[in-house]
Image: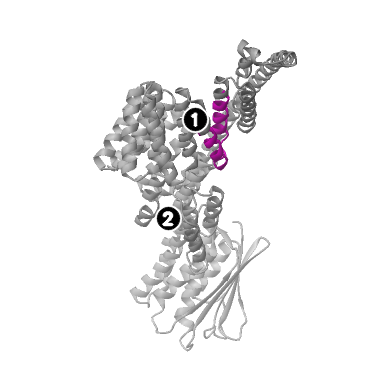
């Protein structure tokens, strides 16, 4: 588990909190090449997914799934961190049901390992999901659970992150006092631990809070502090964003010249990092400065420069902002045609945004016709034809207003109906989950009762075996008696170990169990220098638990007999076990290449405790046991029903 901590949790949390790392294609290709040379396929698939997490979510999910497909059931470490990465990736793509499933699965693995920091990090991610979907009460409960664990483990850095997240939640719901309270605690922790990057994030959040409260002076000072920390950490993009927000606060304070200075500074930082989105924002801000100072030509130049860059960003919202500002600029200098041109472009973008988002109301289009309502624009029209056209436009505008109002009413009704459907659907889900939870609790109680019953039965079996061994072993050394008895008990223990590590608590995959048990018996009983080869070929044989325990005891007796009696004259001893399903029965063929049975051997009349146990236990599970003729050694055939 220590390897897991080093490999995933702390670097993974840093990824979530601080940055979107960009990795080169050569790094990704080198990881892919490792797939051809390494035995740890599952781990390499995970490493590829981890590297490309922020570059391509779909590919990340694909490689995570490949990792899970190649992960063994008992490899809890890989199951844990692949599940966590899958959950966070689904969260980032808005697939919250899948995100919750995988993050909670990772959390269960952490609990099994009693690694509470991992449990807390999952709580933090789950809280973030509920915050995204607006379930703030549930989000807060998970944040507080995460906070309590990190407090108990004295994990100051992760605790600071949780406090910051809680502050963001309160900021979303406009509870400014509580938001500021948690931001201040988070900032204090980051300062104590010297985490400049975390402190910069919190300062940025605090500045946004002040801006939202219209305390622009406080927002200005706080944005300055965050920008300084970002620059000290050489985080040019984040510093540029702080300068953009700082300039907006300065605009609100009327300090326009200083705002121009910080817009220009942000533009320089964004240019150095080739961050096109930030470049566009900075150009728009500089254009706004020149517009406010009535230098409309300069304003237009910067707006057009922003428009040239917007193609690289593909942001409809920024494009709409630029078109609107160009419209306002031309309107201010009474260029009616150009103003209308950009007004129409802005309306087209609005329609595109509406079609993409489907969640916003139609914007009020009254502003489109403000220009035509003014007398000075009518006087600029040179002939009657244009005046008549304007009147036609007014009538058209009125009709459009009515149409828009009608659409608004219909859309509102649709949204209300959609909300009703969503609430009904959530109610059904909660009801279903409650029923499933009750069913699982009931199943767990039944399984616990069954467990107690199995333990009781197994203790009775052990007691009976010891009594039988006692009555048949008067001439055997005590050490040998104990060794034989220990192997029988170990075969039963192995069944239950496999059972409780398995997701399926009702049946056992015999293949893995047989190999492990056989090797243990050979190791404990083989006192010679000869190596006993074990050949296994068992295909998809699953037994119910009761049958599996009995089969384990039968197999123990067969292997014990082979080692004790069959190989005294054999230089290359071998034991072979073949198994397959046939209709409702499983057929197991056991053979060795030893000296075989004596010619007068009679399985019915024999006094051998091992053979009597084999025949008795086979009948107990309603199976059959037979000896088949073979040229070398001995071959036994066991047929067992699949169901008790």
Q: Residue at x 31, y 38 (%)?
A: 228
Task: Identify the image quadrant of the C terminus.
Answer: bottom right
Label located before the other in sequence (1 or 2): 2
Q: Quadrant of residue 349?
A: top right
Task: Identify the image quadrant of the N terminus.
Answer: bottom left
Q: In terms of depth relative to the viewer, which is nearer, 301 or 562?
A: 301
| Vertical placement of residue 620 versus 303, above or below | below
Q: In terms of depth relative to the viewer, which is nearer, 252 or 515?
A: 252
| Vertical placement of residue 498 versus 148, above or below | below
Q: Is residue 303 magenta?
A: yes
Q: How many marks?
A: 2
- The picture places residue 249, in percent across and down from the top left corner, at 39, 26
| Vertical placement of residue 288 versus 77, above or below | above
Residue 138 visible within the image: yes
Q: Residue at x 39, y 74 (%)?
A: 524
- The picture places residue 128, in percent across and down from the top left corner, at 45, 36
Q: Is residue 294 magenta?
A: no
Q: Left or right of 253: which side holds 415?
A: right
Q: What secondary structure is marked by label 1?
A: helix
- The picture places residue 466, in percent across and down from the top left corner, at 40, 65
Q: What secondary structure is marked by label 2?
A: helix
Q: Residues within 10 Å of mark 1 (few under 14, many from 20)?
A: some
Q: In terms of depth relative to the viewer, which is nearer, 359 or 86?
A: 359
Q: Quadrant of residue 462?
A: bottom left
- Residue located beneath label 1 in the image: 298
Q: Which mark is residue 77?
A: 2
- The picture places residue 473, in percent across and down from the top left corner, at 40, 74
Q: Nearer the viewer, mark 1 or mark 2?
A: 1
Mark 1 vs mark 2, CA separation in Å: 60 Å
Which span of residues is magenta-colored? 302-327
Q: Left or right of 461: which side holds 384?
A: right
Q: Left or right of 81: which side holds 477?
A: left
């Amino acid at each position: 588990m220590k390897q897991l901590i080093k490999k995933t949790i702390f670097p993974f949390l840093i990824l979530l909190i601080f940055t979107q790392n960009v990795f080169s294609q050569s790094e990704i290709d080198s990881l892919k090449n490792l797939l051809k040379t390494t035995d740890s396929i599952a781990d390499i698939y995970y490493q590829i997914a981890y590297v490309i997490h922020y570059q391509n979510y779909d590919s990340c999910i694909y490689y995570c799934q490949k990792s899970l497909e190649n992960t063994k059931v008992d490899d809890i470490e890989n199951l844990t961190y692949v599940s966590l990465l899958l959950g966070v990736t689904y969260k980032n793509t808005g697939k919250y049901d899948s995100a919750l499933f995988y993050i909670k699965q990772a959390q269960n693995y952490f609990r099994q390992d009693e690694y509470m920091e991992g449990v807390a990090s999952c709580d933090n991610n789950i809280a973030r999901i509920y915050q995204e979907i607006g379930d703030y009460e549930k989000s807060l409960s998970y944040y507080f659970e995460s906070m309590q664990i990190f407090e108990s483990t004295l994990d100051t850095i992760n605790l600071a992150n949780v406090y910051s997240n809680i502050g963001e939640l309160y900021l979303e719901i406009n509870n400014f006092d509580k938001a500021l309270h948690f931001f201040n605690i988070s900032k204090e922790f980051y300062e104590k631990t010297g985490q400049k990057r975390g402190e910069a994030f919190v300062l940025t959040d605090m500045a946004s809070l002040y801006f939202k409260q219209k305390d622009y002076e406080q927002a200005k000072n706080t944005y300055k502090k965050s920008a300084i920390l970002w620059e000290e950490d050489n985080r040019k993009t984040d510093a540029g964003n702080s300068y953009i927000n700082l300039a907006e606060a300065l605009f609100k304070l009327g300090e326009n010249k200083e705002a121009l200075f910080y817009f220009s500074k942000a533009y320089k930082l964004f240019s150095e990092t080739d961050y096109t989105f930030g470049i566009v924002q900075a150009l728009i801000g500089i254009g706004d400065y020149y517009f406010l100072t009535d230098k409309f030509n300069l304003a237009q130049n910067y707006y057009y420069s922003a428009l040239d860059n917007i193609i690289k960003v593909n942001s409809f919202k920024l494009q709409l902002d630029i078109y609107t500002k160009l419209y306002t600029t031309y309107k201010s200098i009474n260029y009616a045609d150009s103003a209308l041109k950009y007004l129409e472009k802005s309306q087209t973008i609005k329609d595109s945004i509406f079609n993409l988002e489907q969640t916003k109301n139609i914007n009020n289009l009254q502003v489109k016709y403000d220009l035509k309502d003014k007398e000075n624009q009518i006087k600029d029209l040179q002939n009657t034809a244009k005046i008549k056209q304007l009147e036609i436009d007014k009538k058209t505008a009125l009709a459009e207003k009515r149409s828009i109002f009608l659409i608004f009413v219909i859309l509102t009704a649709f949204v209300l109906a959609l909300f009703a459907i969503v609430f009904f659907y959530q109610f059904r889900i909660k009801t279903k989950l409650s029923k499933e939870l009750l069913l699982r609790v009931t199943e767990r109680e039944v399984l616990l009762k069954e467990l107690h019953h199995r333990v009781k039965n197994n203790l009775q079996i052990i007691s009976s075996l010891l009594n039988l061994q006692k009555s048949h072993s008067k001439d055997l050394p005590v050490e040998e008696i104990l060794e034989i008895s220990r192997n029988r008990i170990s075969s039963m223990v192995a069944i239950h170990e496999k059972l409780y590590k398995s997701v399926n608590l009702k049946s056992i995959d015999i293949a893995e169990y047989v190999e492990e048990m056989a090797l243990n018996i050979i190791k404990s009983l083989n006192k010679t220098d000869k190596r006993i080869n074990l050949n296994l070929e068992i295909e998809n044989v699953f037994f119910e638990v009761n049958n599996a325990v009995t089969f384990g005891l039968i197999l123990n007796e067969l292997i014990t007999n082979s080692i004790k009696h069959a190989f005294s004259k054999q230089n290359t001893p071998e034991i072979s076990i073949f198994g397959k399903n046939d209709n409702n029965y499983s057929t197991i063929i056991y053979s060795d290449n030893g000296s075989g049975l004596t010619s007068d051997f009679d399985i019915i009349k024999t006094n051998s405790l091992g053979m009597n146990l084999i025949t008795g236990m086979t009948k107990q599970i309603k199976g059959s046991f037979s000896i088949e003729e073979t040229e070398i050694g001995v071959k036994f055939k066991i047929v067992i029903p699949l169901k008790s």
